[in-house]
Image (cartoon, grey):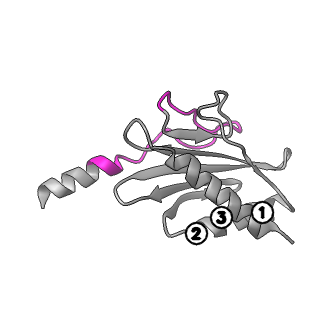
Amino acid sequence: MGIISLFLAACTGKRPDNLGARDGLLTLCPSSPNCVSSQAEDGGHKILYLTLMADPDADFARLAALLRNRADCAIVEEKSGYLRVEFHTRLFVDDGEFLLDRDKRLIHLRSASRVGYSDLGKNRERIEEIRGEFVKGGKR
């Protein structure tokens, strides 16, 4: 039983203490290919932000509700215009962030694996899935 617990702890990793929005910026992605961010400069990490469809605060609240309803997601921090979440797969935990930019009418996002080098595209795939749910839920 102890070996299994050690293995699972190694896969989930420790919750990072360097996340959080500072001056409108999310934490930069590391050089490894297991992170996507709408604020990244390079094509390997760059992903499109979420475009707001109506009232910024209402759309951000809708995103929060969407994330709460996902079986793989737990919100670990919620502030005005900022969400920090953990995405759970069978063995791994990924960290996600969503930052509202009311002036530009968009939501910046970041999703990164906590451990390992490659995520085999899982963070990008998950964010695109969330984008699809967000867009679909915003149609009037």
How far across and down, in percent of the image, does residue 121 sit?
51, 44
- Type of amino acid at the residue the image marks with label 3: Ala
Mark 3 — residue? Answer: 64
Dot 1: few (<14), some (14–19), or many (≥20) neighbours within 10 Å? many
Identify residue for label 1. Answer: 59
For residue 115, the mark is: none
**Placement of 1 over or under 42, stated as above or below:** below
Asked if residue 109 is positioned above or below residue 68 in the image, the reply reads above
Q: In this view, does 37 lie to the left or right of 115?
A: right
Q: Position of residue 14 (x, y in %)?
A: 36, 46
Work out whether residue 79 can be spotted: no
Task: Please provide the residue range marked out in magenta.
Answer: 10-32
Q: Does the magenta stretch include residue 80?
A: no
Question: Which quarter of the image is occupied by the C terminus?
Answer: bottom right
Name the mark on residue 68: 2
Q: Residues within 10 Å of mark 3 (few under 14, many from 20)?
A: some
Q: What residue type is labelled 1?
A: Asp
Which residue is drawn at the image coordinates 70% and 36% (left, top)? Answer: 23
Circles 2 and 3 in contact, beta carbons < 8 Å = yes
Q: Residue at x 68, y 65 (%)?
A: 133
Chain-order first, disc 3 or disc 1: 1
Residue 28 on the magenta segment: yes
- In-image side of 100 versus 94 (left or right): right
Look at the image and tell me whether residue 52 can be seen.
Answer: yes
N-terminal of the pair, mark 1 or mark 2, is: 1
Distance between mark 1 and mark 2 Cα atoms: 14 Å
Q: Where is residue 91 in the image (x, y as percent from the top left)?
A: 34, 56
Residue 29, horizontal then vertical, whole percent: 55, 33
Q: Which residue is drawn at 38% across and 53% down?
A: 92
From the image, which quarter does the N terminus lie in?
A: bottom left
The three-letter code of the residue at mark 2 reads Arg
Mark 2–mark 3 Cα distance, whole angstroms, equals: 6 Å
